[in-house]
Amino acid sequence: MQTGLSKKKGLTDRISLQKFYPFLACLAECARNNPVKPDHRALRHEVTTGPDRNAPGIRLPNGVSANILILGKRIVHDPDDISRWWPTAPSPLVRELLYRRVQREGYLLPVVLSVCVALLREMYTTEPDGNGRRRVRLKQGKTPIADFGIAKGAIPGAKSQDKLAYFYSQGEKDFVRGQEPTDHYWFYFTNINGHKTILDVGLYSINFRSYSATSPYLDGISHTIPHDSAPSFFMDHTMLSRAPRVCETAAEFSVLRNSDLQTAVSSANVDWEKLYRFMDQVAGKDCTEVERALVKYASIDCCQSMGRLLESRAYETWPEAPHLYVDGSSPDEVSVNTDDEETREHKAKWIKKYNRGKITLDEFIEGTKGMFDTRTNTI
């Protein structure tokens, strides 16, 4: 029977990356829901006009096109009752799927880095001892992983309809861009043969809604994961060779082979300043205080969860093939556009007028009132 583990002289557990990555996705989802991360601003305003993926993207003042949410009055964000957030949603499911997209948006770099810190500090420092403790390492196929880190780049397949943008129609009436697929981060793993594998936990907000079920990967994780799902997109060397343009890598930043990070996490007290400098380097700019706080406290949580897992060795019981799902993919969940031809043409006409500068935003909102949230079930 395949176990997804290989043992070297009785001292080392080499865990299949394909078997292990759903746990990493769960850690990322915990980091994304860390209380240090602020609520998305859009969740504190009522949605008055929802997005429509079948309509052309609306060009923003900066020239970028996106699928727009128009937001109205301020409300109290209540994650246990989101009916007030988008009261005119076509169905509770469509409301829930959009909520998940918005709630998961942003702070992708500190989320990914916090999981890398846990791998480096907890897994790649494990050594066997006389008390039955084992060395734990990752492998891809039969080959050990030689490096892992953060890749930075773009998702070329994301269309303007897959990007969200927000217009706050009350007060100062400002536009805010959503998560940008040209500024994206994901995990990379390279084995000793130079073959690469990627894990992306940040695609959900740009409408690629694949996820891993959280069960049975919660051993050691003390926080509740909302929706019992963890966004993930996993591609090994073979898959990448067949679909090379899934992601475009601009740069890679090793975590495992970075001597400063090794020093930073090797002592009892993590040198957070070194970690912040690494995050600034990856981002190409100075990260905010919120991003620094998030990577710090999410890393602490991820390390604790990883440590408990490695101590319990619960990974020995995990399935070889993870259970993967797509939100909205079951017959009861499929989102269907119900616009008639006249309505679709009317939408397109108003969007073209606005994109060409022939009407103001207020005129666009008034002219399309009700079209994007009462006659369509797509997000």
Image: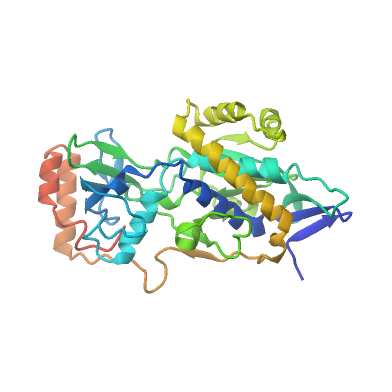
Query: Along the line of sight, which residue is nearer the eye, 53 or 47?
Result: 47
Q: Looking at the image, what colour scheme do you see?
A: rainbow
- Residue 112 is left or right of residue 63, and the answer is right
- Residue 356 is left or right of residue 282, and the answer is left
Image vertical order of residue 98 relative to residue 145, above or below: below
Task: For the C terminus, give its image quadrant.
Answer: bottom left
What is the x, y in percent for residue 336? 30, 67
Is residue 280 visible from the viewing direction of this image? yes
Q: Residue at x 69, y 61 (%)?
A: 314
Q: Residue at x 15, y 50 (%)?
A: 349
What is the x, y in percent for residue 59? 25, 40
Displayed quadrant of residue 61:
top left
Q: Residue at x 63, y 54 (%)?
A: 238
- Residue 63 is left or right of residue 251, and the answer is left
Is residue 152 visible from the viewing direction of this image? no
What is the x, y in percent for residue 57? 27, 47
- Residue 306 is left or right of residue 73, and the answer is right
Image vertical order of residue 42 relative to residue 99, above or below: above
What is the x, y in percent for residue 288? 45, 30
Could you tell me how many numbered marks the image carries?
0
- Residue at the outermost bottom position: 331
Task: For the N terminus, give its image quadrant.
Answer: bottom right
Query: Along the line of sight, which residue is nearer the eye, 149 or 277?
Result: 277
